[in-house]
Amino acid sequence: MTQRPLSFITAVSLVGLAVFLGVLQSLFATVPPARALAGVGHGPGYLSGDGWWLGAYRFDDGAQGFCLNPGKAAPVGLQYSYADPAGMGWWTPEQSAVFAYIARTWAPGGDRLTAAAGQLATWIYAGVTEPEAQKYAARAGADTDAVYARAHEMLAEAQSRGSTGVHAAAVVELAASGPGRVRVELTVDRLSGAESLAPGTHPVSVTLDGATFADGGSTASIPSGTDVPILPSGTGASVAVSATATTSALPYGRDVTVALPTVDAQAVLIARPSTASAVARADVTGPSPLPFQPRVETRTTAPEARPGAQVADRLTVSVADGEGLLPSWGVRAVDDGFEPVTAVVESTLHGPFGAPISEAEAAPDDGATVCTVETEVHGAGEYTTPSCTLPSEGYYVWTDRIDPSRTPEPEGGGRIRPWTSRFGVAQEISRVGSVAAPAVEHQSTRELAATGSDVSAPALWSAGTALAGIGLVTGARLRGRRIPRRARSTWMRR
């Protein structure tokens, strides 16, 4: 059976309406007083040959709407005031949603067929019978059938597309490296079910805390449902970012405005501006996506040694400053918080060489090596590599490097900048001979492996001269995993 949302008002007498309006005034005591307004005439629509109107009505403030009570006096020339029927018990939330959709979608239009069909759809939903609806549609003359069909299409659309509200959901994510993203999804609570709006349907104002947009600002209007890059602004190893999203003037919801007469006449469903709004907030805490540049100072443990002795490399790990770099060691997220990113230092012992070694940018391509060992480092601090055995007399030197690819991307490898030492740095050289003096420590002042300026190191001669009479050993590669001040290694023949 067709519901009659307005059946009780059609039966209200003039005296009863006056009493009702008195109650209405008390119900809306908290609402700002509405201005008095007057119906000034017809909007778009049809006037039948016998003087009956089908279409919209206009008021002196420019508002336009559809009548709710067929058979009552028309609004033209009468005094009205606005009211919100939500507190008057007129309609259920779903009925309000349908009326709101009709008014919002079609009442403001200027096309007379649309206006006539919208008026007819309003009366049908308010409870007129099918014969009555056909009689009212006949006021459109030659367009009767078109108006009648369109009215039913409108009503079906309103009963499906009408909505009780809209809400927003914000997402903020930090990338493993580089920019993160913010996105705001809008969902409409349609009468037919929740609908996630397509990307870009509405603009959303977003304010960031702890990050900026690409233009450097912290506030921007972004399209809904669209990923927008953001750049965390914090300089700590971990960063916190929040986003507050607001959007308003959305064409959804069940808010309805009705113009009520001061006499017994038609109430009018008004085309209310789109007023729905939605707010959302999202927060995220994660590792800073900024890259960091490891820096390593190195020193051999045996500047002087005898064949067969063990030698290792001492590492002092720190982080270099620079524009766009994290000023501290990077971290990665784990179940209980954060832990430092692991980097692998590969240390290669070159030699033996028959003469003191000269400093160069890189080791000679054809130079012999004894071993390569690996040390895992977990932030700034002191580390010692696994040891290698010095096989014979001659000169030996360590080189070291950090290859970011040794750390998987999800574990922070993409944020590590590579590092490589120079070849032949003085404090990395070991002199090995049958009568070599006992190994002693170099001066306590450490210098970067890239500088090689320790004045206590042996004098440097030409590099690469083979040691006469000494058979060069085939280099062995040592693999080990290093935790600060403890080492394990496994020897592997190259």
Image (cartoon, rainbow, N blue to C red):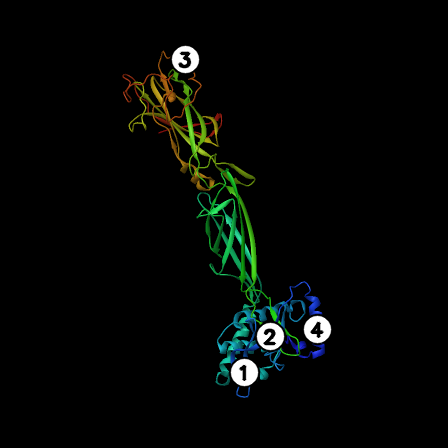
Q: Is residue 194 above or below residue 427?
A: below
**Residue on which the image places disc 4:** 20
Q: Residues within 10 Å of mark 2 (few under 14, many from 20)?
A: some
Q: Nearer the viewer, residue 475 or 456?
A: 456
- Please identify the quadrant where the C terminus is shown: top left
Sequence-wise, the earlier of marks 1 and 4 is 4
Q: How far is mark 2 from mark 4, CA to CA?
A: 20 Å
The mark closer to the camera, 1 or 4, is: 4
Task: Indicate the position of residue 2 as horizontal and vertical percent values.
Answer: 62, 77
Looking at the rendered structure, which numbered label has been put on residue 137?
1
Q: How far is mark 1 from mark 4, CA to CA?
A: 31 Å
Instruction: Give the secondary structure at mark 3.
Output: loop
Q: How far is mark 1 from mark 2, CA to CA?
A: 26 Å
Sequence-wise, the earlier of marks 4 and 3 is 4
Q: Amino acid at mark 2?
A: Ala
Q: Amino acid at mark 1?
A: Ala
- Asked if the residue under mark 4 is in contact with the one under mark 2, i.e. CB atoms within 8 Å, the reply is no
The mark closer to the camera, 1 or 3, is: 1
Looking at the rendered structure, which numbered label has been put on residue 438?
3
